Image (spheres, rainbow, N blue to C red):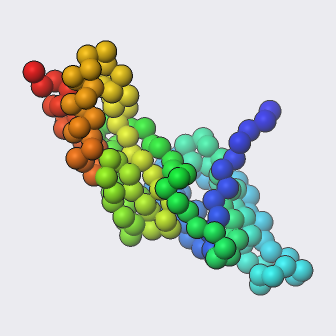
Amino acid sequence: MNSITPLLWFDHNAQQAVDFYLSVFKDSKILKTLYFGKDNPVKQGEVMTISFQMLGQTFTALNGGPHFSFTPAISFVINCATEKEVDYYWDRLSEGGEQEMCGWLKDQFGLSWQVVPDILAEYLSDTNEARSERVMKALMQMHKLSIPGLRKAYEEA
């Protein structure tokens, strides 16, 4: 079966990043770690790649050097059923990073995430345009998306 595996390029701290992500996502694990050999520009025995899973999705972390860095053009969305889940992922992933507008954040490694309540899609796709516009307006004012705040905007008369 074919699959797509996102590769995350780190300067030299892939192991630290993977350890952090595994601490955040409970259903996660390392699948395989590869190390640089003697005929590479990096010290022999250093981590080259780590294949790991978070919530059933496989990723590869690469210690590729300082040539590239993350941008918000690529981000990972975490869909959350409850406010407790939103709070958990928002707080954990933003530790040492940056909290941004509209549910976006950058973690301590510069990777962008969106922490999104499941109910948001329903609210934004409502056929009552006034409702969906109120929700969008409320969303645009929030850093962390709040289910009660979105619900209040949705239910306003």
Query: Farthest residue toward the right?
Result: 39
Q: Nearer the viewer, residue 7 or 142?
A: 142
User: Can residue 2 be seen at all in this image of the molecule?
Assistant: yes
Q: Is 15 situated above or below 31?
A: below
Q: Is 44 situated above or below 54?
A: below
- Location of the C terminus by quadrant is top left
- Location of the N terminus by quadrant is top right
Q: Please report the residue visible at 66 percent of the width from the left and 50 percent of the height from the top.
A: 6
Q: Please report the residue visible at 27 percent of the width from the left and 44 percent of the height from the top.
A: 140
Query: Farthest residue toward the top?
Result: 127
- The image shows residue 133 at horizontal and vertical percentages of 25, 29
Q: Please report the residue visible at 77 percent of the width from the left and 84 percent of the height from the top.
A: 43
Query: Farthest residue toward the bottom?
Result: 43
Q: Nearer the viewer, residue 68 or 28?
A: 68
Query: Farthest residue toward the left?
Result: 157
- The image shows residue 128 at horizontal and vertical percentages of 26, 16
User: Can residue 81 be seen at all in this image of the molecule?
Assistant: no
Q: Quadrant of residue 132?
A: top left
Please state the total of marks drawn on the protein image: 0
- The image shows residue 2 at horizontal and vertical percentages of 78, 36
The answer to whether 83 appears left or right of 26 in the picture is: left
Q: Quadrant of residue 148?
A: top left
Q: Is 152 situated above or below 74?
A: above
Q: Please report the residue visible at 26 percent of the width from the left and 20 percent of the height from the top.
A: 129
The answer to whether 156 appears left or right of 151 in the picture is: left
Q: Is 100 situated above or below 5?
A: below
- The image shows residue 42 at horizontal and vertical percentages of 77, 81
